[in-house]
Image (cartoon, rainbow, N blue to C red):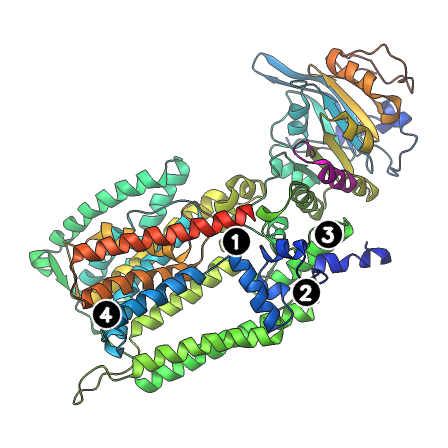
Amino acid sequence: MASKNREADEGAIGMTDFVPGSAEEAAVVASAPAELVAGSVGEYARIWLKRIRSGESGALPVIIGLIVIVLIFQVKSSLFLSAGNLVNLMTQAAFIITLGMAEVFVLLLGEIDLAAGFTAACGAVIALYMVAKNYPWWLAVIVTLVATGAYGALQGFIITRLRLPSFVVTLAGFLGLSGVLLFLISATGSIGNGGVIRLNSNVLNDIEGGALSATASWIVMIVLVALAGLMMYLRDRRRRVAGLVAPPLSITLLKIAVIAIAGVVVVLVGNTNRGTLLLAVRGLPWVVLVVLAILVVYTVLLGRTRFGRYIYAIGGNAEAARRAGVNTNRIRVAAFALCGLTAGITGIIYASYLGSISSGVNGGQNVLNAVAAAVIGGTSLFGGRGKIMDALLGGLVVGVIANGLQLLGLSASAQLMWTALVLVAAVTVDALTRRGRSTA
Amino acid sequence: MTGSPGDGARPAHAGRAPSGTGQGTATIDGPLLQLRGIGKSFGPVSALSGVDLDIPAGQVTALVGDNGAGKSTLIKTVAGIWEPTEGHIIWQGRQVHFRNPRDATEAGIATVYQDLALCDNLDIVQNMLLGHEVRRHLLLDEVSMEQTAKQTLKDLRVVTVRNIRQPVGSLSGGQRQSVAVAKAVMLDAKLVIMDEPTAALGVSQTELVLDLIKRLSERGIAVLVISHNLTDVFQVADRLAILYLGRLVSVGPASDYDTASAVDLMTSGVSHRTGNGGNGGTARTFDSGPEG
């Protein structure tokens, strides 16, 4: 259909012809991903800075915040950045991160799941009861995830079919499941004697307690970085071959280098001896791999599948999604089911961290920490904006504060109040940059 | 109650409309869409009655009328939001029953409502292909989707959009309208219905959208535009259809009308002014029954 003279318009659509420094350029960089507009590393950095100034800061505030908090703790206590404490931090933050990832699915829809903390706890009871009854650990995990996923789907079904607010439905779930938790533990009889079920499985205990060997840690990290790098390289190359605007090779390489450096640092920390001279303890905790695996799978699910695209569409404009032929009810129910399933994974990680599950689990605080983690990371409570990565970064912030204040010997009261301040600060920074964008 | 070819046997040229389309570029045998005796009541309230209207391909038909004249009711009937209480819809010579918007979309009727139905958080490509994503190895094929979207925008000469990977929320009103229209065109729409496309736009943005409407008709697509703004209507429309209190009071080539006669027809249903001589298609009122 395109006649020859229309070819001349190509440049404008291809956005390669703007004049640097012009008002038009400012409008473009304010909204376009830098790697798609830049032609060189220098230009990339320049556009990136411009984007940040105009309010599209991405993950930058939370990363800067994380660095500042880490520096403060390191100044106050030289133990903070020791290998032992950092590995400790990874194991402590893991369940907040995964529960935050669970919440991202429903937060993207503009919904919330307040019951997820107790979904996790009830899931843990199922898993621990089954391994105590000598069922294989993998069967226990499967049954747990099916049960928590089904519970999430039930909540989603009630919310979508009856058109009830998720806040109220999951608040009821929160209350109901805290009762179910007590009931389940007492129903296990002698296994849950005294309100505590011990984790009776070496494999599940090793998620938080065990570690890969130093060599295995290196191999796994190298394979992961190589795969990530290859994927990024191939994707950019495919765009270039197809004649679409693609980032220059230098930027692709730069990104791969950043991932590689992060991987090397994590492995170096994990492989530093954190035991005694006589009894060396080295290697990455298994839970790091579990969290990374969930991160990769969910990032692909949200970013590269129809299901993920529809979640964003519903969060952005549910009516538009409906008119485009999207079965919005089914997507919503599936998102709640995934939230429940991920809460189930969290429950197992949590039980592995504690070595047991008790009737005293504070599922309320856990879920609020998880929502805080997602929001600190940059996920919007109003839907349509957020990434799985947000839960990781935000969960690290929440975990670092808890860990650091504990290390300084501060009480739980101080921990809670500091977490609150950081949450408010994170939302304020987000709102301010956003305001800058809308007036720009 | 699915579409059957039978009733479409009524000769396509029976209507008076095509006779007046001297400047028409349509080449198909009959009008793309024929409405025959369409009526719609909500309980005791009759919102539309006895509407006979032909929409030819490759032309812009403007549907005008005062508030409450039944414009929205009529396009919602064509778009499949609801079924008419009486009369029938003949689409490409076949009688059809659109039971839901999806039926109409699949037939090739795309409706761009005033709210545009865009997701502000998604980029242009994602919005244009929403619900029709292309997959490759089970994952979304962003490259081919971006190429398709880019080509469509290029064909429509939507060149003010500088980056098709920017979120729709960052676009101007006219650009948003363009994206919504491009989305409709990409689904192979043969008829694009636009509800007040220029209502919320400034002068230059209005120009952009009117250009786009002309380009659609050049591509052989039928366009049905609802508008209050007679200036815009006369700038872009090939044909005018005027509704008054739920009845189609006049239809004919736009050149048969001027602003004064159109306003008369919109506000009172009749016009005694000159300037609308044409084919005698003006200032006729209908009974609810079909009329020869």
Say if labels 1 and 3 share a chain.
Answer: no
Chain ID at mark 2: A
Chain ID at mark 1: A
Residue type, numbered disc 4: Lys
Give the residue at x 60% y 30%: B81
Q: Secondary structure at mark 3?
A: helix
Q: Residues within 10 Å of mark 3 (few under 14, many from 20)?
A: many
Q: Secondary structure at mark 4?
A: helix
Give the magenta part as a residue range: B196-212
Q: Identify residue for label 1.
A: A309
Q: CA distance from mark 1 to mark 3?
A: 21 Å
> Residue A76 — which label?
4
Nearer the N terminus, badge 4 or badge 1?
A: 4
Q: CA distance from mark 4 to mark 3?
A: 60 Å
In x, y percent, where is residue B255? 88, 26
Chain ID at mark 3: B
Q: CA distance from mark 2 to mark 3?
A: 15 Å
